[in-house]
Amino acid sequence: MSAEAHSSTEYIKHHLQNLTYGQLPAGYQRADGEVLQQSTWTLAHSAQEAKDMGFMAINLDTMGFSLVLGVLFLFFFRLAAKSAVSGVPGGLQNFVEWVVEFVDSSVKGSFTARNPMVAPLALTIFVWIFLMNLMDLLPIDWMPGLAKLLGLPYMKVVASTDPNATFGMSLTVFALVLYYSVKMKGVGGFLGELTLQPFGKWGMPANLLLEGVNLIAKPVSLALRLFGNMYAGEMIFILIAIMFSGGAVLALTGGVLQWAWAVFHILIITLQAFIFMTLTIVYLDMAHQEHH
């Protein structure tokens, strides 16, 4: 492998690695050759160290950016609600009203039952995921460069490119689906759906297999769809950024491609937030419906 290819590979790996905090066991040899004398909680300095930290490790950048963006969402929407006027609305109020009306119309079009929790949940999902996706439009080297100045080995700003975040959201939706399925239909009704449809009582094993796969596929598809699309988008930005080190012609081409991809990516980040919200509404609607 040439030095240039090796450098490009390291660049890609670095930008795709999360800032992971976890525990390494005593006797562990770190990437810099240091051997730990005792079990230590620390930042991972390589992808292998992050892997060896196991399940209890936490991606600090994913948690940090998702929480900050969630707080910003709550702050600006609360600010718009507190400063709302009945006359001509200001820019912030007008934007918030437009987002709320858009989400409300989506809920009315897809949710046929009555549940006052669904619309606020849909609004939270749409805006929060959109904001996390929107971070992908930041120049790819800004935050990792800032992290390096602060002494941090890695920094990923797009929380939705971390499967831990997407699965965390999808499993929360799945828990709500199970809760309302049991609440609206009872334990017997819910188990009846899993075991008696679509082939009746004589096809229970096949029914359970088909309905069980269908049920489990909901959180998996929610998480992987969002993760896959955002991860691919981030990878394209990284590959375009590599072109800037290839001379004037490639740098100029990379600049044009980066602008074009950023414009197109605005559609992707909005669409992915909308799809996650819409499927959440549909799944909750199905949980409220009783099949006979």
Image (cartoon, helix red, strand yellow):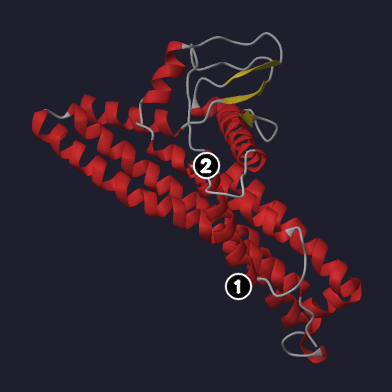
**Residue 2 as seen in the image, left or right of residue 148:** left
Identity of the residue drawn at 43% across and 24% down: 143
Q: Which residue type carries mark 1?
A: Gly
**Residue 14: x percent and y percent?**
41, 28
Instruction: Evaluate whether residue 1 shows in this view.
Output: no
Q: CA distance from mark 1 to mark 2?
A: 26 Å
Residue for badge 2: 92
| Image: 152 above or below 129 | above
Contact between marks 1 and 2 (CB within 8 A): the answer is no
Relative to the observer, which residue lies in front, 86 or 94?
86
Residue for badge 1: 109
| Image: 160 above or below 114 | above
Secondary structure under the numbered disc 2 in the rendered image: helix
Relative to the observer, which residue lies in front, 265 or 20?
265
Q: Quadrant of the C terminus?
A: bottom right
| Image: 120 above or below 58 | below
**Residue 21 as seen in the image, left or right of residue 184:** left
Determine crowd level at label 2: few under 14, some 14-19, many 20+ residues with C-alpha closer than 10 A: some
Q: Mark 1 or mark 2, which is nearer to you?
A: 2
**Residue 11: x percent and y percent?**
34, 28
Q: Which residue type carries mark 2?
A: Leu
